Amino acid sequence: MYGSRGTYRSEVGLKCPNCKVDLVSAARHKITVQTCPSCKGMWFESQQLEELEDETFDFGEHAKGTLIPSSSPTTLKCPECAASLRRFQYRFYDLEMEFCENQHGYWLANDEDTRVLELMRQEEKDLQRKLRVEDRWAATLRRMRSGTLLERLRERLH
């Protein structure tokens, strides 16, 4: 049955793609999402996944968005539109999740939201390390290009 906003719903609400039971609202990491009381899976709307990522690491000016270079079909159905969900590897990590091609959201298995937070923490550390290395390299290049260093090298070579 289709709801007032064109979403696929049972008489009661959204259905779990795995168990077909009604999803219930629950707070996960400060975000209210639809969860399955049986399998503990979670339905994150697209902006909710971005909010989850921002809990740990706000990309700010950096390009953001979940990259899906390839995906494979699943037998799971989108709780919103009943289209087949597709499986992909989240941000090239060893975490697979499903998404709706109609951009309704993402299906995460039990506690995968916590794994997303862990991955974002690591990504932030990696980016901070990369920026520190780039800053140090730029400082080294400036010192190497400075007149005093070049003059000292010339004196030693003559």
Image (cartoon, rainbow, N blue to C red):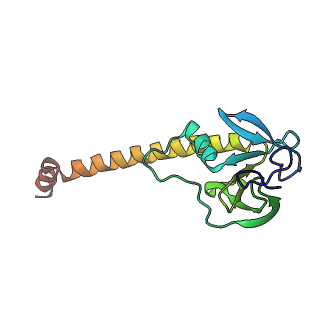
- The image shows residue 55, relative to residue 127, as above or below, that is above
Query: Which residue is nearer to you in this view: 121 or 99?
Result: 99
The quarter in which the N terminus is drawn is bottom right
Please name the residue shown 46% across and 42% down the image. 128
The x and y percentages for residue 109 are 78, 47
For residue 49, side relative to residue 125 (left or right): right
The x and y percentages for residue 76 are 82, 59
Q: Residue furthest front?
A: 4
Query: Which residue is nearer to you in this view: 158 or 19?
Result: 19
Please name the residue shown 89% across and 46% down the image. 21
Quadrant of res 52: top right
The quarter in which the C terminus is drawn is bottom left
All told, the count of numbered labels is: 0
- The image shows residue 104, relative to residue 30, as above or below, that is below
The x and y percentages for residue 3 are 77, 51
Please name the residue shown 77% across and 67% down the image. 73
The x and y percentages for residue 148 are 13, 47
